[in-house]
Image (tube, coloured by chain):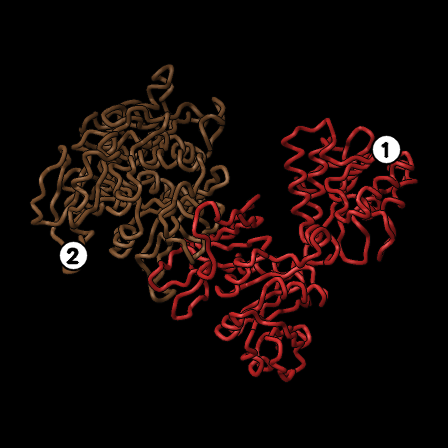
Chain colours: A red, B brown
Amino acid sequence: MKFENVQPGQLLTPTEAMRLAIEEGKKGAGFVSPNPLVGCTIVDRNHRFLAVGYHAQVGQDHAEISAIKKLADPEMLRDSHLYVTLEPCAHQGRTGSCAKAIAPLGVASVTYAVEDPNPLVAGKGADILRAAGVRAVLFSDREDVSEAERTEITAQAEDLAEIFLYFMRSKQVFVGVKVATTLDGKMATTSGESKWITGELAREHTHRTRARYDAIAVGRNTFVADNPSLNVRHRDFPGFQNRVVLFDPEGVTLAELPGSNLVKVRPPESVWALVGKGLKPKNPAGVHVIEIPLNEKGEFEIGDVLARLKLEGLTSLMVEGGSQTYGNFFSSGFVQRLHAYIAPSLLGGRHGVAWSAGFGSGTMAERIRLRRSEREILGEDLYWTARVEFA
Amino acid sequence: MKFENVQPGQLLTPTEAMRLAIEEGKKGAGFVSPNPLVGCTIVDRNHRFLAVGYHAQVGQDHAEISAIKKLADPEMLRDSHLYVTLEPCAHQGRTGSCAKAIAPLGVASVTYAVEDPNPLVAGKGADILRAAGVRAVLFSDREDVSEAERTEITAQAEDLAEIFLYFMRSKQVFVGVKVATTLDGKMATTSGESKWITGELAREHTHRTRARYDAIAVGRNTFVADNPSLNVRHRDFPGFQNRVVLFDPEGVTLAELPGSNLVKVRPPESVWALVGKGLKPKNPAGVHVIEIPLNEKGEFEIGDVLARLKLEGLTSLMVEGGSQTYGNFFSSGFVQRLHAYIAPSLLGGRHGVAWSAGFGSGTMAERIRLRRSEREILGEDLYWTARVEFA
């Protein structure tokens, strides 16, 4: 259900109001980190549509306030019902507490799909509202919606704010993996060709996906083979600056970095080169060099890498290859989401490089499961994204 | 556009009438070989919906006749317009000539989406109609439909009757390949586990797909590992009997055949064992043994196999594995359609068996293209089917 399809005054069920809020929340993707994506729908006392809003930019209005400001007259809030994808915040952050702002406005109820992920704050926003006489209720506690709708809405609201929720709950960097692959799982030929597996629409979509992550990770082999830019080139994100994390345990690419596309398209300090501890590398062209201990195999422990990247300020990271880097991440178990762009072609196994070559399970029971798949057709290609679940 | 959604008397454009005929034609899948799937829509002089029909069983009414018989009164045909997915047949076969049957009925026009594929007969059905004063026109020659719609309808009507059209035009057996695979292209673990990659709905769908082919092909390794039945187990096809073609160049499985599931679920003469010429095998349990010369590598030439299977009466064959058999078929270039059932899981390359391991191209330009993809969500899995195009 999209705002563009909703009429003013249209009757909305609680589930429809929440679906609308979820769709609206997605519009902030790429602009709100480290905040969550949040959407909010307001309906009147008779459950007729009044307004919708979303958190559009970090430091600016939260979704609830954005929706309220769309009303022509604050009196319209009297006895209205708010549907928010996440519990209204209790605390004063960059902006004020939403719960405190809503409390005195005469709203009848606030339904939220997901509790605040911070266990110390969870339920506090709702408490502030209740103290002011506003009915505050978790969507999945509402008895007037079906079990199936409760499950659907909760899952979708969790997905909407997944990076924020994962980071707040686990205190770890959220990792996505992006692959562009043939239908038979190949990402290149053994001779190194990979341009282009997917079509233009899929490649454009990739830029939108990149914008949702704080940084893009790439292995040194892919860096050497492709000299990629890994920036966000998309009309919806003009001037968007992202960071790149280059995995180079032996520090062999540092000399090449100054002339590379990675450095050409962004300030050099946005390129973070991860190298083995003790290499004491020179700092080429102002690139941010981070030393991390290697394990006995001469590789990074992904857990160590993510812990360090969190200290450097990241909440999310998207891994774009190559197969060795994919292998390290999947073998470590630190992958939360897969973004697969699947092209209608076959390269075959004789001369094709499998993107999943570097990891794997020996039994069916140990296979990696993909949950809550969403698929979108992009020209001739298919975008398939899902949560990753390890056995 | 489906019949179930069309109201009696509903106004239909030529494109809508043809889309309806195409959907209706699909209902005959599994029942009409060696005939084509064909559908027919009848609209009145004002282009309002009257009836729809399809070819439901070999030896029974063709689509045009089936639609006409649905009319309460033959007089309703006066000045009506027929939309048929394939040119009405000119000749007397198991049933009479449709063109001759339609000619005297007062129909104003017959639009068909694809010409008769037999060059000796192409246009003859249309000529019979024209001689009787009926306007007979190829859909893509109609000037009142857009270029995009002409392309879409022609492609869909070609796909509907693809097995028949390919066989008539090329005089060769149509080959489909079915794979059940993880998202990263694995069909089993190296330890031999493959049950089950896909879910119940996908496996049920497989039986429906099998019914569209005259026979199922399987390699001897898969036969030994899985002891498969490869029959059609689906409520829509009660008692359906299909043939199996077992690829066994060295004839090593013949002794195992009598107790196998292949023979248990069907008459033994429906199991065709392909073995190398000169093996002079005994004929175990009444199985149909076919000797085919081996090439210098000790393998079958797929072209030879298909030529022989055609002589044995097949028009279509679906290959169900394993990777060596897939490899032989894809390497030979004799594959027309892929049926991929893709599961939301990853097995990885470390211990996973890639279904495409046995073939492959060394350059991107030589990769196999999949054209006119159609996708359907089956539970958590994705069914992706497409025409196969070799470089």
Q: Which residue is mark 1?
A: A108
| Disc 1 from disc 2: Cα separation | 80 Å
Mark whose residue sits in front, 1 or 2: 2
Name, please, the residue furthest toward the top.
B72
Res B83 visible: no
Drawn side of residue B128 relative to residue B8, left or right:
left
Residue B109 image position (x, y, % from top left):
34, 31
Q: Decide: few, some or many residues near mark 1? Use Cα within 10 Å; few <14, some 14-19, many ≥20.
A: some
State the image quarter where residue B139 is shown.
top left
SS for dot 2: loop
State the image quarter where residue B364 is shown.
bottom left
Of B219 and B241, nearer the camera is: B219
Residue B71 image position (x, y, % from top left):
37, 18
What label sits on residue B298 in the rendered view? 2
Residue B297 image position (x, y, % from top left):
17, 59
Q: Residue at x 20, y 51 (%)?
A: B302
Q: Residue at x 35, y 42 (%)?
A: B159
What label sits on residue B14 in the rendered view? none
Amino acid beneath label 2: Gly
